[in-house]
Amino acid sequence: MKNFIKENLVLVVGLTFPLLLILIFFVSTVIPKLMSAPPQYEVLFTTRSYDYQNATDYMLDFAVKNQKLTVKVKKHEGKDSNYDLKRLMAYDAKTDTVREIAIDMPQVLASATDGVAVLHETENMLIDTAIVSPDGYTLDGPSYSGGGLMGGLFGGGNRDSGFRLKKGNIGYKIPHTQQHYYYNQVQFIGWVIKK
């Protein structure tokens, strides 16, 4: 066996080096995540979807006032149909799930004062709008990466198109649950600190 390794050193290094790199990447990404607690707070955000079958008569703008989520409703003006819908989403990293919070438009319109209403669906939630969550996570958007030496060896600079909750080297990618949502148009709202 020793003679085989000595005679075929280049082959042995060529076969073991990729395995060693895989092990190093695994240890550097998985182990820190296992050793830390996942984000404890849901993150609220909006995203857009283009639904050519269902036009909307209203444009929605979300804001947080006194730790309550409000929505400003504006009637869509113009004769062209508006198919660009803003959706309210919540991501829970503990269960790694994204859910849409459905908005009861008749209830919103009935309770709106000057076009602004507190959402019935979120009225029991307290929302913190700080960029950093109480447990230290931030919503990190897509970014371009140069790749560096290792990236150059394996395909070079690429675009990471996903949003994630990030704290130091630990990240929880927000899954794409509905393909027709434009996750590159995510707008951060806040952290659900109490339900």
Image (cartoon, rainbow, N blue to C red):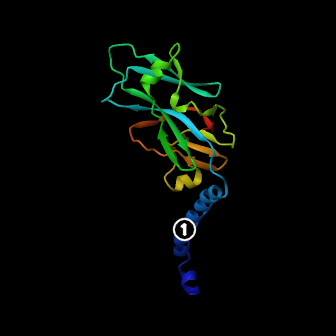
Instruction: Give the residue displayed 64% in from the left and 28% down from the top.
Output: 67
Disc 1 residue type (three-letter): Leu
Instruction: Give the residue displayed 41% in from the left and 20% down from the top.
Output: 58
Q: Which residue is mark 1?
A: 19
Q: Secondary structure at mark 1?
A: helix
The answer to whether residue 84 is left or right of residue 184 is left
Question: How many marks overall?
Answer: 1
Q: Quadrant of the N terminus?
A: bottom right
Residue 37: x %, y % from top left: 65, 52
Viewer-proximal residue among 4 and 58: 58
Relative to 4, residue 194 above or below = above
Instruction: Give the residue displayed 60% in from the left and 56% down from the top.
Output: 29
The answer to whether residue 49 is left or right of residue 131 is left
Q: Quadrant of the C terminus?
A: top right
Viewer-proximal residue among 182 and 160: 182
Residue 89 visible here: yes
